[in-house]
Amino acid sequence: MTPKSHRDTILIEEGKILAQDAHPGEQYVLWVAAPGIASRATPGSFAHLQCDPGLPMRRPLSIMRADAEHGWVEFLYKVVGQGTQLLAQRKPGEQLSIMGPIGQPFRVDPAYPRPLLLGGGVGIPPMMFLADTLRQAGHFNPLVLMGSEIPFPFRQRPSQFLIPGMPEGVIGAMPLLEGWKIPSRLASLQGYPGCFEGFITDLARHWLHTLAPAQQREVAIYACGPHPMLAATAQLAREFGLPCQVSLEEFMACAVGGCAGCVVKVQTRQGPAMKRVCVDGPVFDAEAVFT
């Protein structure tokens, strides 16, 4: 997946809401017919949605899945303010203006056939999209670890896959990934049955320590989640000498690089630089952001 100029990908499309399912913790899965965006979306990209016709300011949401053949995109979001509250009230059949896909995607390297995907909270969607893409590529054997401090937006179940190196009793998995034959495990501090009791990065560290050196050299880390989790992920990658890409979550206004309201400091070959998360990211090399 080669990064493109944002001007090559973005369009505004009148989508049609196909379904919207509510989950505990004011979380929603939104399914929208938007064939133009579905055909261009890549793992790590996001869209800017007009939550309500009476609310001009759009809201950015990561794309969780995209089906170019059938022309739909799927989003997972949590209600956190006026925009997402209005979006949660939208009904199937309604039109929904979507701008996207926006941003640079994850870059997958076949030299690392054992991808480790870490998704925390609303950082889960890009990991789902990436896992689906890796599954279709056929060369990779990903492991997906998800963390949440509110109920997961799916009914977890015991995994059918034995993962050497997992702590005893950590068997909770995501059903969709199970159906894709991709092993997954869950982490939380809330005592959910079958979940690892701790941070997602601690579970990842536990697993990495059980790998032989040759296996560790096959691992690349991809992560999305809250800033503290990404900082801990970058530290984890440094400990094991692994390549790591992170998708940043920042507040955005225009989402197309015009307002510069989402800039972050990034280390480049020329020295420190301010980069826009919306179009220069949201995916960056972890070592460039967390030095």
Image (cartoon, rainbow, N blue to C red):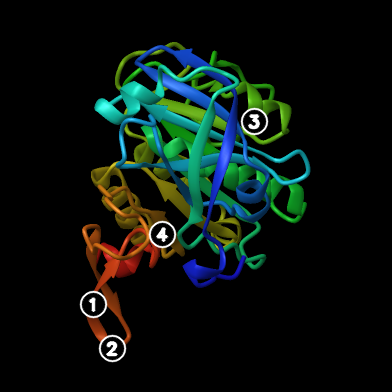
Q: Is residue 53 left or right of residue 133?
A: left
Name the kind of residue labelled 4 in the image: Phe
Front residue of 6 and 112: 6
Q: CA distance from mark 4 to mark 1?
A: 27 Å
Residue for point 47% across, 30% down: 76
Which residue is labeled 4 in the image?
Answer: 240
Front residue of 21 and 13: 13
Confirm or deny contact between disc 2 and disc 1 (CB under 8 A): yes
Disc on res. 273: 1
Q: Tell me: residue 10, above or below residue 195.
A: below
Which residue is labeled 2 in the image?
Answer: 270
Foreground: disc 3 or disc 1: 1
Name the kind of residue labelled 2 in the image: Gln
Q: Can the viewer see residue 224 in this picture? A: yes
Which residue is labeled 3 in the image?
Answer: 177
Characterize the local packing of mark 3: few (<14), some (14-19) or many (20 or more) Cα atoms within 10 angstroms. Answer: some
The quadrant in which the N terminus is found is bottom right
Residue for point 55% across, 24% down: 94
Q: Can the viewer see residue 143 in this picture? A: no
Q: Is residue 120 left or right of residue 136?
A: left
Confirm or deny contact between disc 2 and disc 3 (CB under 8 A): no
Marks 2 and 3, the one that precedes in the sequence: 3
Name the kind of residue labelled 3 in the image: Leu
Residue for point 62% across, 44% down: 131
Characterize the local packing of mark 1: few (<14), some (14-19) or many (20 or more) Cα atoms within 10 angstroms. Answer: few
The secondary element bearing badge 3 is classed as helix
Foreground: disc 3 or disc 4: 3
Q: Residue 92: which quarter of the image? A: top right
Front residue of 254 and 129: 254
